Amino acid sequence: MVRRLLIANRGEIAVRIARSAHRLGLDTVGIYSEPDRSALHVDSVDRAVALGGATPTESYLRVDAVLDAAVSTGADAVHPGYGFLA
């Protein structure tokens, strides 16, 4: 059973996924790069994890960092969203 979902995306897609997850009673974890520190998707999740980096290649596309964020927060599942990892 999924209880905590890591959303491996940013922007409006991540906001919509977080909203739906909350309606299902799931805790949410978001990830962000340095330029996205104050983005809406960071405020839409229960917990946010900084991946560092300024570009997608240095942050969202670092599968090792995304998986580390999932493990360190106790996420049961990862939602790839749309684009980057999907």
Image (spheres, rainbow, N blue to C red):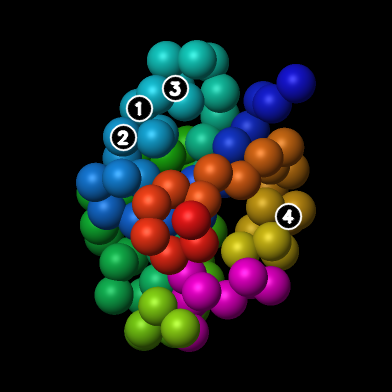
Disc 2 and disc 3: Cα gap in Å? 10 Å
Relative to 20, is 46 on the left or the right?
right
Q: Amino acid at mark 1?
A: Arg
Residue at label 1?
Answer: 19
- Earlier in the chain: of badge 4 and badge 3, it is 3
Mark 1, Cα crowd under 10 Å, few <14 / some 14-19 / many 20+, is some
Element type at marker 1? helix
The label nearer to you, 2 versus 4, is: 2
Disc 2 and disc 1: Cα gap in Å? 5 Å
- Earlier in the chain: of badge 2 and badge 4, it is 2
Can you see residue 42?
no
Disc 4 and disc 1: Cα gap in Å? 22 Å
Element type at marker 2? helix
Give the percent coordinates (x, y) of residue 17. Answer: 39, 35
Disc 2 and disc 4: Cα gap in Å? 23 Å
Q: Amino acid at mark 2?
A: Arg
Question: Mark 1 touching mark 3, by CB under 8 A?
Answer: yes
Question: Mark 2 touching mark 3, by CB under 8 A?
Answer: no
Relative to 63, is 38 on the left or the right?
left
Magenta span contains residue 42: no
Question: Residue placed at 38% from the left, 52% from the top?
Answer: 82
Element type at marker 4? helix
Residue at label 2?
Answer: 16
Question: Residue placed at 31% from the left, 40% from the top?
Answer: 15
Residue at label 4?
Answer: 72
- Earlier in the chain: of badge 4 and badge 1, it is 1
Viewer-side residue, 82 vs 32: 82
Give me the disc on residue 22. 3
